[in-house]
Image: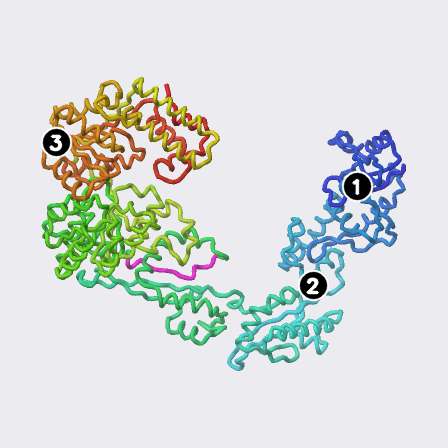
């Protein structure tokens, strides 16, 4: 046969081909059958097709040779393949040559037989090329093949087993382990260890292998310098002799180590010189100053390790010590509010070097002396001057309040973040706030004074004590009681307790403009009119009122968010005794001007009020925390933690500064009357159904090819129009005139009027919530058409005075049967217990907003049972959105949380499910 061996470089499965340019198909098939007659798994070669190879202008077929087939071919001692190809014969010779690992983990032939064939054939990309042997790296190609064969793996395992005899040398053991696993070598094996490894692999037990060692000696009573002595160790027998003895020829070795030892010692001196480290050298030893020793450990030792020179150091110098500041807050008690919080604190701290404490004075001295090495508690340590200076500056500059927040934060975060620190090292700052926390638990709870202990319910007294206790600690507070539990009353009591203790006081209450007069009414029940300042009106009036308030010992300013922005220059001049931020979730976005302005106010204590269950919204918790306690959650010193804060961890961190009670939790103390819910599903009228289908089809006719901005507009326009249709077809058409009130056009409208009529006959007063100004106006007109007394409609277009008069009119006039309120304009902050029925005419898809609205009626002061009715058009968007909210978390975020998730990214089928009228 005239088949030649062809190499396929870097081909994992078929490293070779057998090629005969003149062979016909039958000849090649017979060759393949002979080659794979042992390989049952490949169907004796049937699984492998002949490969077409291009050469010059011709092409021919070649037999692919797998790894196992190559072993079969090269292990053929009986000439089943009587080919005369010189490379097959040469590779057979190479199989007898040991393969050894190089220091970097690559493999090489221990020697190369001289008779290398002059020409080699190579296939790349199915093209055959012939080279002279010296032109290509044929050794690499053959080694990559041989290291995959079974015989090699057997020999390799034996080599590894032999090397394990020297497992006491960590360098050899690690190197052998990496070779065994075929993993990348992290660093080449240094020369003396590699020489020993080769001797072991060659079974050479006679040759001696020498290593230079350096031993660092600490100063003693007779010597102020550090001493570095050189030694020679024979690795095979593990015998060590001082270098000065080697110089004199005093050693037990059979071969002379002096020439190589002298060369290495000279190289060591060269390392010191190259790194400009001054030393005093003599035969076999070096004297080092403190600075030179530090540079030796930091700069020279790693270089020696790479050269295979072993360096022995005192144990305390082997690793830079852990430096940590242990900071402790100490409590000091004040008896009054007159100078701020009841409890202030100062900071004491000590440095911890590993587990040993160092006093401040010594620490400062070491930093000032800029030492590189220190002697502490009978041990020598490398001293990280830069880190020590940073820690000292941090200890000197940290404020007690900031430290307290950071301490609370790190107590929760440390187990999750520091536990996996490199090499288990301790964090560089350890904060002990336990004394302050113990004070929170054990210090006498602030007493609720008369007359508030009789005015407040038990849970409100607890809330007042908690607010006063948080003030004592100088920590801002979030009072997040359920709507209707009397947060404002607890604030009145809080202010009154402070006024009783302070000679002068100034309080700032910031709220939405719709609540200005609610606060006016609440404050007027307990405080002198001269103390209460509702900050509104013209610029001149506001300025004059503010200036006149300065003459009073006590004053309470109530201002809207918007007005605070306009009058920021006035209000930021004052150090407020306390700032109360009502409906704080309204300014949760830190980028808004209202939020930025509120954050600039300086107050001895800040309280955020919110009835929204913000504990389920981590981003709101973070925002509120930053408003009342800047830097607590968003620690700018360690921002990586901020990104990692998980919702559960945020709640854990917030818990000390937030108090939230639900109505269910305080029901026994609250004793609210019953509240019943009635959900009404109504069908559309024929008119509504026809219009509904037309609106949906009109949208889809234009939707498919529209760009995203157009889709966005179309979706929300359609959604709004369908919701209006569900209310009344006249609303969708913006009709005027009496035809709007014809019965049968909207079952929802008809039922609403029936409910209102029944309540009026029963003497019940009601609140009707709607999102639409048109709907509210229809209710007003219907009332007049029926000859009934006019009803008020509270919406966002009213002035503050109009709102105030409207609410007072409804409260004072029992003949007004119901009041209409725009959900977003009056769904919070109002007290309307004069009504005992609630009608949600159209739905707002955030349940918390609806609950807030309902709690304008079902709250403290309500004497009657409350009934709540919600109306929903069956089979429409009103019903389908609620279902999709449960299935589509992204849709829920878009509709409920108001986030800018694109509804227009939903598929057409999902959109049809959302909008289309269902049977």
Q: Position of residue 400 (x, y in %)?
A: 31, 62
Is residue 466 among the parts visible in the rendering? no
Q: Residues within 10 Å of mark 3 (few under 14, many from 20)?
A: some
Q: Residues within 10 Å of mark 1 (few under 14, many from 20)?
A: few
- Which mark lies nearer to you, 3 or 2? 3
Q: Position of residue 60 (x, y in %)?
A: 84, 35
Residue toward you, 849 or 859: 849
Please tell me whether mark 3 sits on a helix, a strand or a loop.
Answer: loop
User: Is tag 3's residue or tag 2's residue first in the polypeptide sequence?
Assistant: 2
State the count of labels: 3
Residue toward you, 534 or 187: 534
Q: Quadrant of the N terminus?
A: top right
In which image quadrant can residue 503 be found?
bottom left
Q: Is residue 913 left or right of residue 28?
A: left
Q: Residue furthest bottom?
A: 222
Residue wearing tag 2: 191
* Figure colour scheme: rainbow
Residue toward you, 302 or 780: 780
Q: Position of residue 514 (x, y in %)?
A: 21, 43
User: Is tag 2's residue or tag 1's residue first in the polypeptide sequence?
Assistant: 1
Instruction: Find out whether residue 900 is within the magenta segment.
Output: no
Q: Is residue 899 left or right of residue 344?
A: right
Residue wearing tag 3: 816
The numbered mark at residue 127 is 1
Q: Which residues are magenta?
A: 424-436
Residue toward you, 761 or 365: 761
Instruction: Find out whether residue 433 is within the magenta segment.
Output: yes
- Which mark lies nearer to you, 2 or 1? 1
Give the CA distance from mark 2 to mark 1.
43 Å
Give the CA distance from mark 3 to mark 1.
98 Å
Please tell me whether mark 1 sits on a helix, a strand or a loop.
Answer: strand
Q: Position of residue 94 (x, y in %)?
A: 82, 49
């Amino acid at each position: 046969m005239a088949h030649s061996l062809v190499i396929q470089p870097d081909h994992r499965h078929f490293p070779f081909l057998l090629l005969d340019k003149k062979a016909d198909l039958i000849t090649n098939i017979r060759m393949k059958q002979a080659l794979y007659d042992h390989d049952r798994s490949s169907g004796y070669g049937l699984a492998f097709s002949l490969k077409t190879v291009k050469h010059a202008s011709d092409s021919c077929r070649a037999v692919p040779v797998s790894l196992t087939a190559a072993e079969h071919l090269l292990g053929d001692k009986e000439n089943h393949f009587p080919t005369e190809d010189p490379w097959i014969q040469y590779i057979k010779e190479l199989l007898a040559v040991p393969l050894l690992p190089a220091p970097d983990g690559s493999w090489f032939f221990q020697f190369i037989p001289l008779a290398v064939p002059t020409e080699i054939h190579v296939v790349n990309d199915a093209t055959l090329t012939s080279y002279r042997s010296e032109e290509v790296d044929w050794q690499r190609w053959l080694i990559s093949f041989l290291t995959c064969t079974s015989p090699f793996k057997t020999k390799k395992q034996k080599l590894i087993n032999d090397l394990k005899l020297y497992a006491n040398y960590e360098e050899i053991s690690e190197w052998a382990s990496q070779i065994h696993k075929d993993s990348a070598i992290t660093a080449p094996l240094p020369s003396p260890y590699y020489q020993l490894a080769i001797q072991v692999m060659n079974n050479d037990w006679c040759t001696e292998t020498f290593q230079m060692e350096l031993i660092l000696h600490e100063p003693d009573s007779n010597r102020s310098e550090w001493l570095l002595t050189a030694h020679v160790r024979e690795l095979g027998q593990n015998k060590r002799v001082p270098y000065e003895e080697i110089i004199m020829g005093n050693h037990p070795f059979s071969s002379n180590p002096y020439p190589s030892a002298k060369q290495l010692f000279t190289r060591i001196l060269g390392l010191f010189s190259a790194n400009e480290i001054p030393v005093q050298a003599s035969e076999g030893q070096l004297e080092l100053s403190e600075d030179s020793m530090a540079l030796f450990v930091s700069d020279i030792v790693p270089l020696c390790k790479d050269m295979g020179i072993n360096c022995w150091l005192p144990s305390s110098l082997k690793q830079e010590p852990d430096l940590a500041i242990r900071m402790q807050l100490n409590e000091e008690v004040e008896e009054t509010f007159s100078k701020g919080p009841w409890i202030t604190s100062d900071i004491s701290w000590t440095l911890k070097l590993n587990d040993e404490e160092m006093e401040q004075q010594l620490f400062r001295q070491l930093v000032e002396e800029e030492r590189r090495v220190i002697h502490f508690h009978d041990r020598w340590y490398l001293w990280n001057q830069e880190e020590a200076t940073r820690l000292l500056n941090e200890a000197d500059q940290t404020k007690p309040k900031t430290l307290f927040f950071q301490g609370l934060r790190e107590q929760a975060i440390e187990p999750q973040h520091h536990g996996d620190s490199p090499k288990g090292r301790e964090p560089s700052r350890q904060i002990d706030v336990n004394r302050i926390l113990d004070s929170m638990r054990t210090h006498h709870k602030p007493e609720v004074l008369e007359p508030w202990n009789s005015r407040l319910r038990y849970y409100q007294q607890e809330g007042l004590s908690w607010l006063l206790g948080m003030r004592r600690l100088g920590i801002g507070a979030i009072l997040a009681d359920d709507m209707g539990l009397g947060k404002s009353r607890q604030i009145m009591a809080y202010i009154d307790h402070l006024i009783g203790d302070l000679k002068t006081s100034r309080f700032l209450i910031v709220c939405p403009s719709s609540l200005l007069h609610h606060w006016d009414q609440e404050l007027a029940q307990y405080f002198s009119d001269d103390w209460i300042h509702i900050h509104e009106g013209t610029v001149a009036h506001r300025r004059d009122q503010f200036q006149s308030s300065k003459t009073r010992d006590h004053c309470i300013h109530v201002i809207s968010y918007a007005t605070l922005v306009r009058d920021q220059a006035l209000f930021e001049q004052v150090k407020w005794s306390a700032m109360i931020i009502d409906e704080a979730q309204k300014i949760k976005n830190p980028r808004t001007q209202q939020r930025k302005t509120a954050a600039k106010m300086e107050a001895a204590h800040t309280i955020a009020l919110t009835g929204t269950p913000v504990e389920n919204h981590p981003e709101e918790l973070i925002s509120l925390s930053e408003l009342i306690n800047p830097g607590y959650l968003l620690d700018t010193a360690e921002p990586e933690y901020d990104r990692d804060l998980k919702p559960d961890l945020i709640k854990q961190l917030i818990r000390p500064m937030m108090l939230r009670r639900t109505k269910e939790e305080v029901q026994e103390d609250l004793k609210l009357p019953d509240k019943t819910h009635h959900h009404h599903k109504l069908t559309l009228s024929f008119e509504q159904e026809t219009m509904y289908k037309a609106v949906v089809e009109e949208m889809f006719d234009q939707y498919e090819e529209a760009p995203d901005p157009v889709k966005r507009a179309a979706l929300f326009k359609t959604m709004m129009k369908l919701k209006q249709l569900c209310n009344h077809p006249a609303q969708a058409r913006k009709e005027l005139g009496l035809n709007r009130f014809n019965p049968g056009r909207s079952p929802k409208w008809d039922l609403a009027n029936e409910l209102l009529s029944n309540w009026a006959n029963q003497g019940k007063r009601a609140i009707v919530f709607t999102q639409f100004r048109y709907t509210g106006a229809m209710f007003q007109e219907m009332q007049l058409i029926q000859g009934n007394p006019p009803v008020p409609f509270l919406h966002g277009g009213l002035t503050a005075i109009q709102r105030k008069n409207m609410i007072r009119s409804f409260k004072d006039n029992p003949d007004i049967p119901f009041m209409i309120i725009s959900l977003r304009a009056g769904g919070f902050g109002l007290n309307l217990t004069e009504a005992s029925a609630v009608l949600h005419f159209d739905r707002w898809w955030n349940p918390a907003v609806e609950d807030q609205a309902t709690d304008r009626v079902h709250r403290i002061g309500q004497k009657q049972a409350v009934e709540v009715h919600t109306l929903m058009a069956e089979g429409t968007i009103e019903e389908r959105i609620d279902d999709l909210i449960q299935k589509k978390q992204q849709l829920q975020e878009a509709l409920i949380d108001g986030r800018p998730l694109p509804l227009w990214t939903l598929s057409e089928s999902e959109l049809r499910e959302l909008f289309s009228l269902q049977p």
